[in-house]
Amino acid sequence: MQTAEKSSRYPGIKATGTKKYHVLIADDDETSRRVISHFVSKMGYTPHLASDGEECIKKAEEEEMHVLLLDISMPKKDGFDVMNHLKENNITLPVIMVTASHEIPLAVKCIKMGAFEYLTKPVSIERLEIVLRNALSGSQLQHQVIKLQKELKSKEVFHHIIGKSPAIRDTMEQAMQVMETDLNVLILGESGTGKELFAQALHNGSKRKNGPFISVNCAAISNDLADSLLFGHVKGSFTGANNDHTGFFEQADRGTIFLDEIGDMNSDIQAKVLRALQEHKIRKVGEKAEKTVDFRVISATNRDFSEAIMNNQFREDLYFRLEEFPLFIPPLRDRDEDIKQLAKHFLDEFASANNLEPLQFSEEAMASLMEYGWPGNIRELKNAVQRAAVTRKSNVIELLHTPRIHGKSPSQQPVLQKKAEECPPAVQSSPLLSLEDHEREAILKACDASKGNLTRTAKMLGIGRATLYRKLDKFQLQHLKNG
């Protein structure tokens, strides 16, 4: 069989690229399938056959196809049913409709539904090759445009987040997947990892970006003031209420409310917040009528919710309402590749803010930065860099003047035992599994549920296919790639 990089056997036509493309041929006529399959192979593509609409949909979902040759009249599901299913399930590939009918209205209907081209039987092989080549070229261009758009958006919304390590890139990738939805996001991570920066990025990249972003420190809300601060009050509703006040939830109307340190919220306040999340309605203190408010909730904590729930310190029903999509921010000790870049950024930032000449670290100073465990994460690193800049002897920082940096710190145990791909341990009597055990188990369950389809597995886990492949290697599950 020829490969796509070889020249076409038809004069004046070149095969598309060097990649081996897969063409799905759906036709209930066996002769048509065989004839088209034969010529598709001669053109350098790999043909896949389906005899009815349901089989076509199954192959399009489970295997990577680059173009679909779709007959209109088929049993079980016709070509239009197939087109509708692909559209509803966001399966994007160019579709070339093939039919024995020469009616113009039918061709118009196909194009309106999103078909790339319309061919009539008997199919001209020269015409088929031209259409296939153009469809694949157009698809490649579309994918490149989409990729570039995602890269540009990622650079725009994450411009305050510094780092290129696999750990932080995975987190950004997951954030991009949930960014444009209205799912409530629970950001998990140790203190100083940059949870609020990610919350702001999620808002800036969402369809609510033109609305308000209201940040609330839940740990600072007292029981007495909770109703007024969260939901507002009207003038005269209590002593000292000299004016109407708009609460945080109403301030976030058509935007995002960020509930920082949600794990430290008083248990009595949790019940009120739960109702607001369930109903999307609030009632000001002193008012009888409720008001519907349109908001999205992003929350963050450095606490271990499994322990808080078991100790009745946090409502389990509120936890599941907040955690429609969990996002784990890795600690700095898991981002060794980013320490140098972060330290240089903070040093340059300090020099610029204080009108100083450019500063730099000596090799010894940078080595000490790389060796330390950073239990305080990025916030601690920034403080250490600023102290070093203030106490420097010259424009080259030779020594970091901080009592905490004396080589590698003791092993730091993560505060949280979960990542975004895992299902959180709810109230349970059995011992909690380790982070890696949870990850491995989640991957195995998702793979089993998707019957070995890695595209579906990655989608179920909320991660990219490339991320899934890295994790399969990490947990020695390479055999699943061939499943």
Image: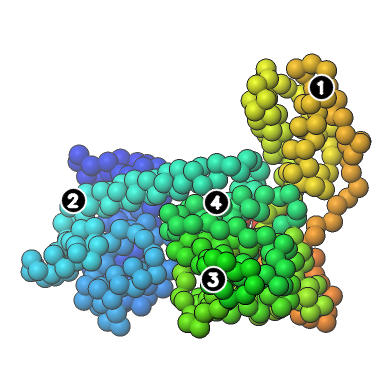
Q: Which residue is mark 2?
A: 126
Image location of residue 232, percent across then percent down: 56, 70
- Between the residue at mark 3 and the residue at mark 1, the CA separation in whole angstroms equals 55 Å
Looking at the image, do the residues carrying marks 4 and 3 touch, with CB atoms under 8 Å apart?
no
**Residue underneath mark 4:** 201
x and y percent of residue 366 in the render? 79, 29
Residue carrying label 3: 235
Cα–Cα span, label 3 and label 2: 79 Å
Q: Nearer the viewer, residue 387 or 16?
A: 387
Is residue 453 visible to us here? no
Q: Amino acid at mark 1?
A: Arg
Which mark sits nearer the N-terminus, 4 or 3? 4
Query: Callout 1: few (<14), some (14-19), or many (20+) C-alpha neighbours within 10 Å?
Result: some
> Which quadrant: the C terminus?
bottom right
Q: Nearer the viewer, mark 2 or mark 1?
A: 1
Q: Are marks 2 and 1 in contact (CB under 8 Å)?
A: no
- Given contact means CB atoms under 8 Å apart, are the residues at marks 3 and 2 in contact? no
Q: Earlier in the sequence, mark 2 or mark 1?
A: 2
The amino acid pointed to by label 4 is: Ala
In the image: residue 135, left or right of residue 234: left
Identify the element where label 1 is drawn: loop
Check the image and report above or below for 129 versus 451. Answer: above
- Please state which amino acid type lies under the numbered disc 2: Glu
Q: Residue at x 35, y 53 (%)?
A: 45
**Residue at left 25%, top 44%?**
9
